[in-house]
Image (cartoon, helix red, strand yellow):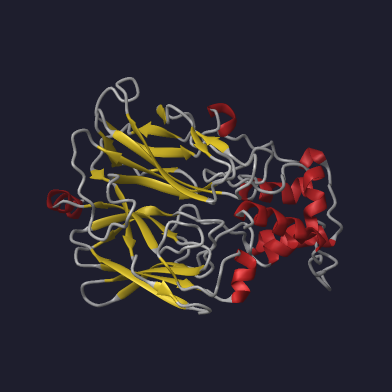
Amino acid sequence: MSHPRMLIALAATGLAVGAAAPAQAGNEAAETATFYKDVLPILQANCQTCHRPVGQNIGGLVAPMSLTSYAETRPWARSIASKVEAREMPPWFATGPAGVFANERGLTDAEIDTILRWVDAGAPAGDSADAPPSRQWTEEASGGWSNGAPDFIVKLPEPYRVEDDIYDLNANLFHTLTETELPQDTWVRGWEFKTGTEGVVHHMCVFFRPPGTAYTPAPGATEGADALGELLSCIAEGAESGMLPDGFGVLLEKGTSLIFNMHYHKEPADGSGVWSQPEVGFFVADEPVRYKVQNDFIPNAGFEIPPQHPHYRVGTSRLLEKDTYVLTYWPHAHLRATGARYTAVYPDGSEELLLDVPHYDQNWQETYKYKEPKLLPQGTRIDVDFWYDNTAERAARRDFDPNRAVGHGNRTDDEMALAFIGYAEVDPEAAATDNQN
């Protein structure tokens, strides 16, 4: 099976021979766009987060080319034009609702027009004196952490070996926080994961379990997660880290255990084994925490997708028992998944679209983060739908067997329908105070 990152790189390389953007006929009076004056600012603001020599997001996905200089960018001019005109880059897989998510990507019509005019003119460099200052990246001064240097870092004490013969492996790696790592109960406002291995991690989840706690799994918890504890977060290729809003946090008690839930996926071969030593960087809350954040998922583990089915739907839902602030959504599925949608059904029967991802891509699993926490009232039902394509046509692109009925499973060529959600329940006293403000 080809690794997803290899597929991305190959796809991007293939774009280099794509057709140039069509000329803007009859617009000869339009000013010629140049790289340094017009295009570079667009790349800095929208593309270089991944497209730089050491560019990567927290999921470990490295862009297949750097776009920080004219020499690097010029060979890809036609490919860039093709991708931005089709609105495939920068990557954003949701179609709605627009404008509510903090990490929403996209170019304006004017920015797309600028790039197309630049390519149509022959991709001229222009005057380097017109270039904006080079963008400075937080990782360069923080040891690779995208949100700056963490307040404390927890690293698995010993590296874990993923052997040569491994194709799919799910491993739970336990570590109790030492007094040096966590000397007292601490509220954290954010965290960032490092998988400790390039190229072989399908996903990384971190759970935490307070000392002396007999963990009781949440209703509907799936096999493999029901003995781990409370979920801190998960990442996969395409994921990014971020801070919680002011007043929101997660409490880590002194003596808490962390469980690194690692899913490794690679081609078995002699010499393919790697060592993995995952770590988490934590950021301590510097303001009082009013709302305790929880991260978990709305699951459906009882489905079976028929062979050769082109558009199979799997649904799941949850009824909110309290007023709830929602912070994030993260739909998670595997190779056959093509779309996901979250919908709120309010107590009065009205509905609101919360998130629509009609172009789901396992190779780039976005966490959708609200600009402002969204308050859903008690009694709201969150419905989540996933869609899957189990046909030979998709199998030829994603490398799976379309002739088998597939259900929930941990292997990459099994499927999942896990609607992750980050939220904070509102207690009555806090709700009363909110209503007065």
Determine the image quadrant of residue 353: bottom left
Q: Nearer the viewer, residue 145 or 264?
A: 264
In depth, the one of 319 and 304 nearer the eye is 304
| Nearer to us in this view, 157 or 233 | 157
Report how many numbered discs are placed on residues in the image: 0
Question: Which quadrant holds the N terminus?
Answer: bottom right
Vertical comparison of 321 with 167: above or below = below
Horizontally, residue 356 falls left or right of residue 211, namely right
Is residue 315 rendered to the left or right of residue 430?
Answer: right
Which residue is drawn at the image coordinates 41% and 48% (left, top)? 234
Q: Residue furthest top?
A: 180
Residue 318 locus on image (x, y percent) = 26, 65
Image location (x, y in percent) of residue 299: 33, 62
**Residue at x 79% of width, y 61% of height:** 117
Give residue 144's position: percent from left, percent from top.
55, 32
| Residue at 55% over, 28% down | 143
In the foreground, 34 or 275: 275
**Horizontal side of residue 279 vs 124, given as left or right:** left
Report whether residue 247 is seen. no
Tell me, yes or no, if residue 192 can be seen here: yes
Above/below status of 135 relative to 177: below
- Image x and y of residue 130, in percent: 77, 42
**Residue at position x 21%, y 76% in the image:** 348
- Residue 127 lies left or right of residue 351; in this view the side is right
